[in-house]
Image (spheres, rainbow, N blue to C red):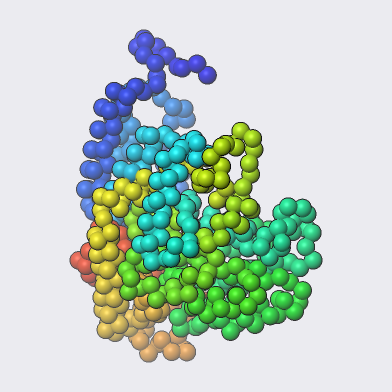
Amino acid sequence: MPPVVIAGSGRLSRMTPEEFRTAGHRLIDWIADYRLSMEQRPVRPSIDPGQVKAAMASEPGEPSVDVEPLLAFMDSVVVPGSTMVQHPMHYGWFPSNAGLASVLGDIASSGLGSLGISWESGPALTEVEEVVTDWLRKLVGLSDRWSSTIHDTASTSCLVALILARERASGNSYADRGLAGLDEAPVVYCTDHSHSSVRKAALLAGYGSDNVRIVAHDRRDFSMDVADLRAAIEADAADGRRPAAVVATIGTTGTTAVDPLAEIVAVAAEDGLWVHVDAAMAGSVMILPDHRHLWAGVEDADSITWNPHKWLGTILDTSIFHIRNTEFLIQVMSTNPSYLQSGADGTVTQYRDWGIPLGRRFRALKILFHLSIDGVGALQARLRRDLDNARWLAEQIEAAPDWQVVAPVVLQTVCVVHHPRGADSAGADDDLDVLNRHTLAWVEAINRSGEAYLTPTMLDGRWVARVSIGVETTEREHVARLWGLMKNAVSAS
Ligand SMILES: *Cc1c(COP(=O)(O)O)cnc(C)c1O
């Protein structure tokens, strides 16, 4: 399409670098002001489905180089339509930090506009990624037998891992008849507390729902029951199936439960199963050496994923994938059409052969800026603060009558119920319906107030409130304020 000429102005609509400079400064100011005013805003917008769409025109307006109308739109429609996950009173889902240092790296990446389809198309894009992901490998205490890359999300990492597991278990079935050519269906093992992305990855990788085996878990700490894993593997093998992969979670989404990885890798090794470690949320804590016991055994896994874009604070989408056998990874993932071949092949890393997409952004700059500006010491101190805050909150809850912490507080998540008819009703006579309605009601009352936000979760058949601590700006005073809100909410509902 030819460039659009704005009537009367005679100016090409394409923004020039000088116009970008002016508008860009305004935008940076807007972002800084937005972050500064965050705490004064409600955490969750009170907004109806369709309200944002209704506030927008059906066609783009007259083009203009003036960003003020766009910033006004941000203020009047986008901000009031956004859940403030960077708000210090946000305790929902998991920390989804977007540290400003990493935001700068994101802007640098966009400004550069690099294209990562091969080493040639972006030598720096490739090599900076190799170096900074290796920094992260060392930061979480992994040995140099691991190689690393950035995927968009942990969901993608899990899909890649389960495709690799499928191919290893099936002797490269993709090279001829695919799964249709197999007599023995490959099977994936995980627990009910694994993230939904595990099941999704297994289905997308072609295993089929019948071949996703839910292993039993410990009733008290929600970790995988390894005896049941072993029994399930034996039963499947006896049944003519091919046990292919186990996904171990270090820090489940519901309660941050930790599957016993050392035992899992030992069981998996007996039958050559692929072990994928999903540490999407909790991987960040491994920058604290005294927490690495939580994934003892990790060196004998096959692949690991963790998200700096969660607790560590690098903005989305920055999910790290560590892999031991890159040769096998490349064999399964590579495609090499002639226009992508080059003389550098064999001496350089071609990240297109490490995952699903061909084109990649220069995501490593987000990590480079984040680590270079904030520094590891500050990140470690922030994580320790969050761990302390979670322990503190758990202590307050344990000491309060009628309140109960219902899962071990391993990291920064506290799962809690309040018994409306007193602590005695916590026994077998507890009316589950009454308790569930009460929990959902007081959580919703807090969320509706806009003063804080938490997400309830279903834990082995009962609703519990989940307080996930870890937003960059959440200090002790905020957690104390939340505890006050919780006590008020239960007496009101
Ligand atoms: C958040 C989370 C995921 C999914 O992460 P995405 O990067 O959004 O795909 C998977 N597993 C666990 C344990 C998580 O906490």
Residue plotted at (52% across, 71% down): 300
Q: Answer whether residue 78 is visible to the viewer in this image.
A: no
72 and 367: which one is in front?
367
Provide residue 457's location: percent of width, then percent of height: 45, 69
Measured along the vertical axis of the image, is residue 492 above or below residue 345?
below
In this orientation, does residue 37 appear? yes
Q: Position of residue 120 (x, y in %)?
A: 50, 36
Q: Residue at x 30, y 82 (%)?
A: 398
Q: Furthest residue to the left?
A: 477
Give how far across and how far down residue 414 sits, in percent. Answer: 35, 73
Question: Residue 72: where, in percent of width, then height?
Answer: 30, 34
| Nearer the observer, 345 or 57 | 345
Question: Which image quadrant is residue 375 in?
Answer: bottom left
Instruction: Look at the picture and state if 210 lies above or below 461.
Output: above
Q: Residue at x 71, y 76 (%)?
A: 236
Image quadrant of residue 95?
Answer: bottom left
Q: Quadrant of residue 378?
A: bottom left
Residue 316 versus residue 69: which sits nearer the camera? 316
Left or right side of 390 for 427: right
Q: The C terminus lies in which quarter of the figure?
A: bottom left
Is residue 307 toward the left or the right of residue 72 in the image?
right
